[in-house]
Image (cartoon, grey):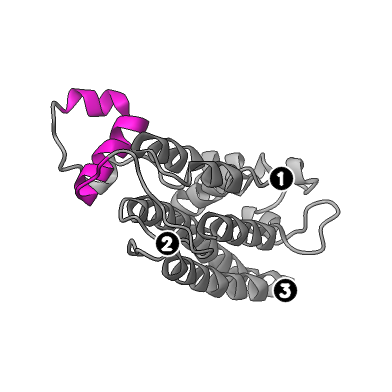
Amino acid sequence: MRPSRRFAILHKSASARIHRLRRLAEMACIRPSDQFANANREISWVAIELHNTVSNFARAFFLSCTLNPITESGTRITCTHTVSSFIDAIDLAMKACRFSMWSRASGRKNWQRRDEPPWHQPATLIDSSWEIGCSNYASIIAAFALPTMVFDHLPKFRNFYAHRNDSTSANAQSLALQYSISPNQHPSRILCAPAYGRPQALILDWIDDTLNVIELLCE
């Protein structure tokens, strides 16, 4: 996902990817029990790719803010801190979010992607935007005020699918009770179950929450 001077372009790119994941998740969640292997594979893909999309969007959104972009409502975004390049922008994000590493680097700016702060966490975008003085800072705060746990809980399921061991499984299963879902089942079955009082699967709620946050950020 690339930075853009128009949030509408960024929004369209991110939402298109996420809607494709939603369609796959819908199919996985209605598979009969004897097709669990297929459902598990599909939910695994959805969880990992949703996590990646959130990270890539947040990073692209932050870099876009340095280009004085236009929001979907027509507002021009400005920054009080002069940022001459994406390299400088990432360096300022490192200063805001990984100050200890940044301070030890003694002026280094050629950060590797693995060095960068965790873009899937709202705090990374919030703190980085504050560091460069984004004029839409209040809107960013408001977007992440949406009542959802997707940004906290999705990474634990993503880690399970990436590593598949007893520890990552237990971490994912431990979240189920917060949604009144039985924890004594496979993480994929948890994601395909509805939270208490909800008409659709938990993973679909998380996908919809992600779409809503992205829309609020770009509007």
Q: Amino acid at mark 3?
A: Ile
Would you say 87 lies left or right of 21 here? left
Residue 129 in sight here: yes
Residue 182, horizontal then vertical, whole percent: 77, 47
Q: Nearer the viewer, residue 120 or 35?
A: 120
Q: Quadrant of residue 180?
A: top right
C-alpha gap between disc 1 and disc 3? 19 Å
Q: Which label belongs to residue 30?
A: 3
Residue 156 in sight here: no
Q: Which label belongs to residue 70?
A: 2
Residue 3, horizontal then vertical, whole percent: 33, 61
Disc 3 element: loop
Q: Main secondary structure of the magenta part?
A: helix
* Residue, disc 1: 176
Disc on the earlier residue, 2 or 3: 3
Q: Quadrant of residue 79?
A: top left
Residue in the image at 34% along x and 55% along y: 68
Task: Name the quadrant of the N terminus.
Answer: bottom left
Between tags 2 and 3, which lies in front? 2
Would you say 58 lies left or right of 186 here? left
Segment colored magenta = 82-105
C-alpha gap between disc 2 and disc 1? 40 Å
Q: Nearer the viewer, residue 101 or 79?
A: 79
